[in-house]
Image (cartoon, grey):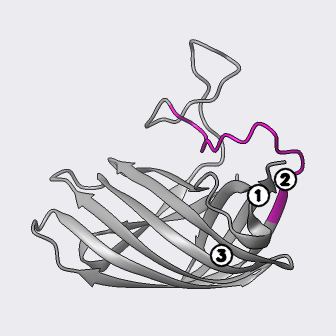
Amino acid sequence: MRFNAVLVLLPFSVAQLVPVSPILPVSPVSPVQPVSPVSPVSKPTNPAPDRHVMTIARGTFEPKLTPVPMHSPKLGRMTIDKEIHGDLEATTQGEMLSAMTAVKGSAGYVALELVTGTLNGKKGSFVLQHYAFMNRGVPDLKVVVVPDSGTDELTGISGSFKIIVEGKQHSYEFEYGFVD
């Protein structure tokens, strides 16, 4: 069985790698629909009813996270700057908010990143939205393109951005398409 790793970012620049099983359990209510062990939402959703062809871009990235002061020790804030290489050659600028709980292995974060660069020869920008949490060590991470955020040659882009961490190397698989 192959396991992927998800980088879960917590306040105070603490990072944990948690294995994620690629197989989700099947709901006893509906044997066809997979469900997350943490949430009733099992797959990232990014509605794009008119998209036809999805492409997968792959590559690596180097993240730089810089803590920003917050009012509460249980809440964290960081700026995100990334250099992305591969099928997507880009830089990002973003903001992340995170929260820790008293229970070990439970936390959450949200983030928005403006991605500017070239995707398989098409220039422009778009926004990625992160939504992640850990429930007693079980992670759930979704990173999707904000609908209608694409500009220039990336107008109409939709998709999901999978973050892969192996050791200290960060890579991605970006499944994307364009709405007609």
Please tell me in which quadrant of the rendered image residue 47 appears.
top right
Dot 2: within a 10 Å radius of its alpha carbon, few (fewer than 14), some, or many (20 or more) residues?
few
* Mark 2 or 3, nearer chain start: 2
| SS of the residue under disc 2 | loop
Amino acid identity at mark 3: Ser
Label 2 to label 1: alpha-carbon separation: 5 Å
Range of the magenta residues? 41-56
Identify the residue position indicated by label 2 in the image.
54
Label 2 or label 3, whichever lies nearer to me, is 2
Q: Is residue 23 rendered to the left or right of residue 179?
A: left
Is residue 29 found left or right of 140 in the rendered image?
A: right
Looking at the rendered structure, the secondary structure element under dot 1 is strand
Report if residue 160 lies within the magenta region. Answer: no
Give the answer, above or below, for where 127 lies relative to 69: above
Is residue 50 shown in magenta?
Answer: yes
Mark 2 or mark 1: name the one nearer the start of the chain.
2
In this view of the protein, which residue sits in the foreground, 120 or 164?
120
How far apart, in angstroms, are the residues tagged by discs 3 and 1?
Answer: 16 Å
Asked if labels 1 and 2 touch by Cβ distance under 8 angstroms, the answer is yes
For the residues labelled 2 and 3, the Cα–Cα distance comes to: 19 Å
The amino acid type found where label 2 is placed reads: Met
What number is the disc on residue 176?
1
Whichever of labels 3 and 1 marks the residue nearer the N terminus, that label is 3
- The disc at residue 171 is 3
